[in-house]
Image (cartoon, rainbow, N blue to C red):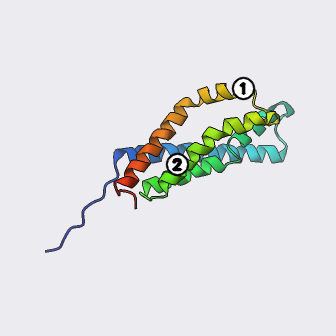
Amino acid sequence: MTEKRPKHRRPIWVWLISVFYFGFGASGIMAVGMALVLFFRGSVPPEQLPVLNTMLQSSLWGLLPAVSVAGALSLFFMKKIAFPIFTGLLAIRTALPAIFAAHPDYGFSKSTAEMIAGYALGYGILLGVCIYAYHLRKTGQLR
């Protein structure tokens, strides 16, 4: 008789988190790409340049969306690196408003408290993802 290997099914939360962060990151990368094309072609009206500059800086010129995609893929493939990626993403996203508030020339018009309040749901979701990835790592489901 042939022995069947046990199927390792991904939990539904892994699917949901991976799809969400992959879509979020991919759309962010496309938005940054479009903004860079518009910026370097000079086809942006001068009054829109501060808005475009703020968007590019708040995504760290596409780095944060790329990290979101990397986190989504690593979690989908059940890799241990998923936990450090999501934890690093949470740390950077939490520190970003304070960093930009310290440099008023970045163009943010809101105060740090308003920015943090505005992103509270996103931070909560990302914190939940970090806790879930930590749980998966501790139970040995991430390889």
Choose between 11 and 89: the one closer to the eye. 89
Where residue 126 appears, as percent x and y from the top left, is: 51, 40
Callout 2: 10 Å neighbours few (<14), some, many (20+)? many
Residue type beneath disc 1: Lys
Contact flag, marks 1 and 2 (Cβ < 8 Å) = no
Examine the rendered structure and indicate whether residue 13 appears above or below residue 49.
below
Q: Secondary structure at mark 2?
A: helix
Choose between 116 and 59: the one closer to the eye. 116
Where residue 124 appears, as percent x and y from the top left, is: 50, 34
Residue sitting at x 69%, y 40%: 58
Q: Quadrant of the N terminus?
A: bottom left
Query: Image check: 11 left or right of 115?
Result: left
Q: Number of marks in the image?
A: 2
Residue on which disc 2 sits: 86
Q: In the figure, residue 5 lies in which quadrant?
A: bottom left
- Is residue 15 visible from the viewing direction of this image? no
Residue on which disc 1 sits: 110
Distance from the alpha carbon under mark 1 to that under mark 2: 26 Å
Residue found at the far left of this picture: 1
Residue type beneath disc 2: Phe
Query: Image check: 35 left or right of 80?
Result: right
Choose between 93 and 10: the one closer to the eye. 93
Query: Image check: 65 left or right of 138?
Result: right
Residue sitting at x 42%, y 43%: 16
Where residue 95 appears, as percent x and y from the top left, is: 65, 40
Callout 1: 10 Å neighbours few (<14), some, many (20+)? few
Examine the rendered structure and indicate whether residue 14 appears above or below residue 125.
below
- Is residue 2 visible from the viewing direction of this image? yes
Q: Quadrant of the C terminus?
A: bottom left
Examine the rendered structure and indicate whether residue 29 appears above or below residue 122.
below
